[in-house]
Image (spheres, helix red, strand yellow):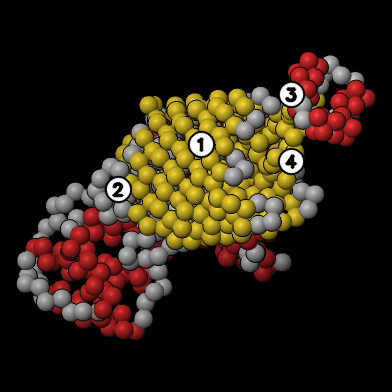
Amino acid sequence: MFRAFIVITVLFCIFPVSLMAADPAEIKRLAIDKKLHEDPYWHVLLHYRKTWSGFESEVDGELFFLSARGKTDPAEELSATVDGFFLPLTSIRREDIESHPRCAFPARYRFIRDSLGLTDGDFPSLPCRNFDVYRADFNARSVSYMFASYYMAAPASIYGHTFMKFNTDRADREELLDYAVNFAANPGDLDFFRYALYGLLGGYQGNYSLLPYHMKVREYNDMEDRDLWEYELNLTDRQIYLLQLHLWELAGRSSFRYYFATENCSYQLLTLLEAAAPEAELSSEYGGWVIPSETVKLLVNRGLVREVRYRPSARSALRQRMKQLTESERDYVMAIIESRLEPLLPPTEKNTYLYDTVLAALLYKKDQGDWTDEDRQYYRKLLLQRTQMPSFEDNRKYEPESTRVDQGHAPVLLRLGIGQDRDGLASRFVFRPIYQDFLAADTGYMPFSEIEVFSLRVRASQEAKPRIESARLMYLYSLSPADGISLAPSYMVDVGMRTVRARTVKRSPALTSDAALFMQSETIKEAVERDRHPELTLAHELLLGIREETVYRPVAYADVLYGLSTGNVYSRSRFRYATGLLGGATVESGKASYIIPRASAVFVGGTQTMRSHLQGNCYAGNVRNGCEIQMGFGFTPMKNHELRLEGIYGKETREYFVSYSHYF
């Protein structure tokens, strides 16, 4: 008994508790009277969402709730939180003091205290040293919403990725020491198909993490060749403080089901930002698909962005430098790198720039893993020579290799077209929830790429019934022009259902089924053929209203192509192009399954307002063989409006369409 008294006394001296603290029962009564559990900000802090039966928090981590029913009962969680603030220190080990609710949930504490008009003296006080260190280390003057550009090598990143950065007063060269806030899934070691399936169905958890900004730069800028666009937010000091309080509550204590399409990185960052700006109601804008680039547009449109900055990837920075050189100078740089030559250049400003470009190219090869011991020794030798040359101020103007995502067209597309196909006059309707194709303006998007998920095409023709032309589950097409430094593959993956021409039949609404069969019987046909009077059959068919009608059948398919492409990557012209050669196969499964070898040659080029697409496809299968040519021309008079002309000419298909597209 005496020992317990000594322990309590020591804890009281180390962690003094206010003797003037109010009664928790009285605080809970005040909270009930003010219906604090119904306050929208309380729901923001607990991430509650309205359901058919009440409320449910999107947080899954047990450490985040102080009540066993806190996930679905805002009032119970509020009551348990107040009780937690008065939890005796004797019930917690000294090394676990930071887990005390008073230290673990500072945003909840501030909300309850201020909403009820209370002061710190009305609650027990205790030192939360880890939280104090956290606040001191951040010392942020502003917060930036970061967009990492599209990454076609990973399914979860084909729409880009967002995270946040807390900016201090460090100089530009020292900003790498700032902190970044990331929300990401923890998929573990999964194959591609399970990774994609679990991501669509919420099969794994996502967490907030706090890490140095230079680690994100290394990951995105250097290793994955992704440009970073920084959108500095227009937040006050108080809002930044509230954001930091809530982040402290989430990091390490919460987990969320991760969905690629909905509750993804961007969605969770919006819910975090609502702790700083609840009146913006950012997450409520999305009841379904959440696209990272669209969340950037939302912040810009809400007036929450103060300034925009661009940080090129290692590859983009190298291309920026190469564009400043003449063609002969670029060839000289390439020759030096490939043959590991020792450049014998006089110390002029131009030659210094060439030296620095060679060094940048070697560093890029290192980042891509294409680095040998000979490369390392060669780099050190050149670096030593460079230190003996004078330095000059670089006043060149570098244009960003990518474009601001907030300036791109809207993601959802509706297209109406009219034209001609093998069945006569035709009309076409296209609905595409996301995202981009070769003929659309690529401002804010990845150049030379096509991305579609769950798109639908419906066609009605003069001599065929209306049908679903295609329903795509996923379609990715990426052309990565070679630049002489690196060689990235180009590829196409297309999975879905489409209808193919099956046969032509004769139908007549004026005939009974027996009469129609009689008119098409072998006896009649033989008589007409014997007497050589085909016009007799034609006359009868016209008289009785018989006409030909094309029948189509659905097939499931998967197309895969892989190859290489090139283009004018170093040109400073507004006209950009890429051309590629790809090979692969088409798999169709209907009444039977077929594997059809396929080869494609493709050209894509144009400006931001006018673009063209030319592609040749050749097939070498039993059920499908021969070649076809696809042609397209797109014109964008305004950001979300587009006109295009498209056509296909081949052995089995001859068609053209003029269409209008609207993005929203």
313 lies left or right of 97: left
Q: Are marks 4 and 3 in contact (CB under 8 Å)?
A: no
Secondary structure of residue under mark 2 = loop
Nearer to us: label 2 or label 3: 3
Q: Are marks 2 and 1 in contact (CB under 8 Å)?
A: no
Secondary structure of residue under mark 4 = strand
Q: Tell me the number on the disc at residue 647.
A: 1
Secondary structure of residue under mark 1 = strand
- Distance of mark 4 from mark 3, alpha carbons? 27 Å
Q: How many numbered markers are drawn? A: 4
Residue 200: x and y in percent read 66, 49
Which residue is at the front of the view, 620 or 600? 620
Q: How crowded is mark 4: few (under 14 residues within 10 Å), some or many (20 or more)?
A: few
Mark 4 or mark 2: whose residue is earlier in sequence:
2
Mark 2 or mark 1: whose residue is earlier in sequence:
2
Residue 78: x and y in percent read 66, 38
Which residue is at the front of the view, 623 or 214? 623
- Distance of mark 4 from mark 1, alpha carbons? 21 Å
Q: How crowded is mark 1: few (under 14 residues within 10 Å), some or many (20 or more)?
A: some
Residue type pointed to by label 4: Ala
Residue 91: x and y in percent read 67, 58
- Distance of mark 4 from mark 2, alpha carbons? 50 Å
- Distance of mark 2 from mark 3, alpha carbons? 69 Å
- In the picture of the structure, the residue carrying the numbered disc 4 is 502
Q: Residues within 10 Å of mark 3 (few under 14, many from 20)?
A: few
- In the picture of the structure, the residue carrying the numbered disc 2 is 400
Q: In this view, does 148 lie above or below 657?
A: below
501 lies left or right of 436: right
Mark 2 or mark 3: whose residue is earlier in sequence:
2
Which residue is at the front of the view, 164 or 612? 612
- In the picture of the structure, the residue carrying the numbered disc 3 is 535
